[in-house]
Image (tube, rainbow, N blue to C red):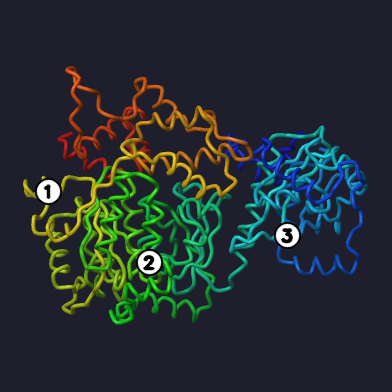
Amino acid sequence: MQYQANRPGAGTLLGATSLVQASGEGGLDLQAIARSHQRSSSYGISRSQQPDLAQLSRAELAQTLEASQALTGHARPVMETLYDQIRNTHSMVILSDAEGTIIHTLGDRDFLAKADRVALGPGGRWSEQLRGTNAIGTALHEQKPTTVHAQQHYLDANRFLTCSAAPIFDHRGKVLGVLDVSGECGSFHKHTMALVRMSAQMIENHLLAGSFPDCITLHFHSRAEFVGTLVEGIVSFTPGGRFLAANRSAQFQLGLTLAALQSHTFASLFGEPLSRLFEHHRKAAPGLLELCLHNGIRIHGRAELRLHDQHFQAAREAVIDLPGRLPSPAAIPTAPERHARSGQAHPGLDALDTGDARMSAIIAKLRRVIDRDIPILITGETGTGKEWLAQAIHHAGARGGAAPFVAVNCSAIPENLIEAELFGYEDGAFTGARRKGAIGKIAQAQGGTLFLDEIGDMPLALQGRLLRVLQERAVTPLGSQRLIPVRFALVCATNQPLREMAARHAFREDLYYRINGLQLRLPALRERSDLDGLIERILRHEGGPHAPRFDTQALALLHAGRWPGNLRQLSNLIRTALAMADGEAAIGLQHLPDDFLEEAALAPSGSTGQAAAAPDGRAPEPLSIHDSEWAAIERALHAHQGNVSAAAKALGVSRNTLYRRFKSRGH
């Protein structure tokens, strides 16, 4: 199949395919085909039977088209662009509804005549129950992109076709229909599925943009040049900041499913009050806004406010005036009330118990102290899952559910802004302050959980103010004399030795003992015995129940890995491997990231990241958290030829964090 890049608009999709070229999207999922053949047989379909060519009546087709009006309206321009790129290849572009009924087609005239012989036109029905294994019906059943080539069709009559189809989802994750490119089997091309998937994603983005007449939409990506392209994340909120919808790229970048996102707000996802968007939008040439995701990754975003003028002003005031509308302590349900409603005890913690004895012991301790107003300090290497555990603690206690979970990365906020971010400020408190002031992170956590990550990086001057807040249970915004009562559960995390820092006066000793009610050390990934369980859980979470699994070679390499980035590195590797192996039966070595394979090749035979044995055969002295972290930094810098930005990205931390570590080591 030859694509015509010189045609008008041809570069729109072909340029995007370079982002997914290596993901195997042109490959065939033999397991999915086998499952479909089994279903086809169970439907009582004979391979040699003539296909059911009965089409919808004119009245039935009109009714179907009416029901799919929104889908068709957004899909037509995308289908025209897609067809421009496959024109004169004996192929056609097809749109079906969620039942597999074709509702619109575009194609080469010579191929359309052949397609009519198998009812591959408007009104034709292509569910698996009627046609057996075919790209449209199988993509609907599997709910994932599907290629069915030649002999893989169940019916002999359809085996002259090669078809690549991708389901189209709405903002709730419901399948609306299928986009398909079908052609003669001799014209099969590996790029076809990439074009179909990109086009389906474009339709989903258009549908999302038209779903809410009054909303605030953020277009974002970690790389500024990708904002406004097909791979950008798109997330919409109500005028008051509640989550409404997100496209699949946004879900991937945020690391959260649609179900998990329902309980979030703009502030909980991006660590900023929604008022910052309004203030940024008011500038004459606002440009891109810099934000930080809940997982610490910095992004670039462009806000789109589809609000009537009166809604805009009401939304601004509703967001900025939050201090007067904080939930009262009496409104917080007790632990027995919440657990009685849920019918479960600490479900968030159960999800983290995947078979490792140390993790099981940690969870057992937590179940004894949750909801008893005992501050929790989580320690461990970078990437061991400290924020995951903090969120599980939050959802397991009485403050879970609708109560806020406010995460603050103390190392990611510039030192000159951290005081304002934590405590808030009044109008005119300092030069550049927003009109009417802003609520701080501590007050935002009222009734919920405040998670202070990287607390070892908090400036000494602010540690005294934080200690006073924790003792008085009240916060005073900058430039104000009034006290705002606050009540929240406190969870702190660090990968630094706070006790040693307190001994050399690098961290306040009184604050250390105030936040250290129960200290828990998360084991490094190389120390855990549940790697298989973690891999399986991440695979299911990221790829669903039918996601491919690692083959024997790839799994052995994962077990031999040193994992300096711990769970964060494992999670990112699995996401990448799933994308690279999309449409294939298993994940192999060819689907693993190059940097991981290079690191594995550099590692000594049998190395699992443990310290080498001493010459006299004695067990090695375990590395301190501080030394282990520095070893991970050195490996990352070596792997990236001293490039600090690349090393920071590989480790999942900011460049500022690395520079602080260099300074602490005297570099």
Q: Quadrant of residue 370?
A: bottom left
Towards the viewer: 229 or 472: 472
Q: Quadrant of residue 64?
A: bottom right
How far apart are labels 2 and 1 at the CA level?
37 Å
Q: Quadrant of residue 87?
A: top right
The number of numbered badges drawn on the structure is 3
Q: Which disc, if any, is residue 98? A: 3
Disc 2 target residue: 276
Disc 1 target residue: 499
Q: Earlier in the sequence, mark 2 or mark 1?
A: 2
Q: Earlier in the sequence, mark 2 or mark 3?
A: 3
Front tag of 2 and 3? 3
Q: Residue at the location (54% across, 70% down)?
A: 306
Q: Is residue 213 above or below residue 84?
A: below
User: At label 3, which amino acid type do we have?
Assistant: Ala
User: At label 1, which amino acid type do we have?
Assistant: Arg
How far apart are labels 3 and 1 at the CA level?
60 Å
How far apart are labels 2 and 3 at the CA level?
40 Å
Q: Is residue 588 above or below residue 448?
A: above
- Disc 1 on helix, strand or loop? helix
Residue 379: where, in percent of width, then height? 23, 48
Q: Earlier in the sequence, mark 3 or mark 1?
A: 3
Q: Which disc, if any, is residue 365? A: none
Q: Residue at the location (52% across, 35% down)?
A: 550
- Disc 3 on helix, strand or loop? loop
Q: Residues within 10 Å of mark 2 (few under 14, many from 20)?
A: some
